[in-house]
Image: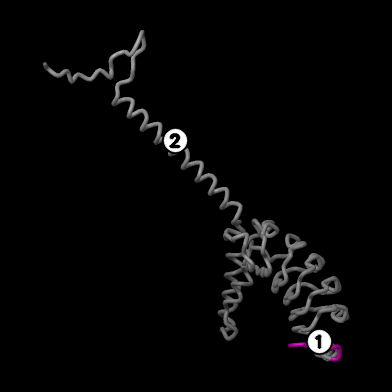
Amino acid sequence: MKENNEDFSHVPAGDGGDTVPGGTKRRLLTAVAIMAGLLLFFLAAKTLAGAFDRQYVVIDSTTYSLSDRSVELTLMYEDGVEHLKDFTRLEELKITPFREAMRGTVKDDAPPEAKAQIEAMIKEQYGDCTDVEDISYIEGLGINKLDISRCAVSDCNVIATLKGLRELDISYTEITDISPLTELGELSVLHIEGLDIEDMSPLFDMPALTVVYGADEQTAEELAEAGITAIN
């Protein structure tokens, strides 16, 4: 008897409706599976992107991890500085104006003409960069070390909100009144080089102070008598 090998998969199964041929059905199932895979891929990518956004921030075009313990900002502009409050483990913070960082690359023994040319170039090319006059965005941070040397800060009241601060560098800033710093009960090391401080007496009202850098000769002698090390 002759075998009948005819494929009946396309023959209607019942009263009325056409069935999909077997090959076409497989192609449809494959397409659906691919689409589902792509959808899952995009959802996973979106989730990972969200996780990245929650773990990293951009400050002045530089990316930082929110788990960083030490952060150094060399600021041309102050875009994103408000994100400092989002750091979860921050202990040490240094803020430097970009122009001051540029000046710091000039060797002390460089010829005066070279220094003048570099200074002119800095003013011309980076004249619109920040001098970092306002640091209100650091208010209340839980850091223990702060370096704002060479920033154009003139008021240290916001620094007085950093209650866990143990070391502070305000050298070559515009600060002339250090009395707010007496509120820092844990401050032990203070840098005041290059400052024109009107009244040094607040130094003796800082209970944890052990070392002062940059005090004038008379103040250094008085600090030594009070058991505080003065280093020039």
Q: Secondary structure at mark 2?
A: helix
Question: What residue is at 19 percent from the left and 19 percent from the top?
Answer: 6
Residue where numbered disc 2 is placed: 36
Report whether 97 appears left or right of 189: left
Q: Where's the N terminus, which quadrant?
A: top left
Q: Amino acid at mark 2?
A: Ala
**Residue 30's x, y, as percent?**
36, 33
Q: Assess whether residue 227 is covered by the magenta stretch.
A: yes
- The answer to which quarter of the image holds residue 32 is top left
Q: Assess whether residue 164 is covered by the magenta stretch.
A: no
- The answer to which quarter of the image holds residue 147 is bottom right
Q: Secondary structure at mark 1?
A: loop
Q: Which residues are magenta?
A: 225-232
**Residue 39's x, y, as percent?**
47, 37
170 vs 7, nearest the viewer: 7
**Residue 189's x, y, as percent?**
75, 79
Above or below — where is 2 with respect to 217? above
Residue where numbered disc 1 is placed: 228
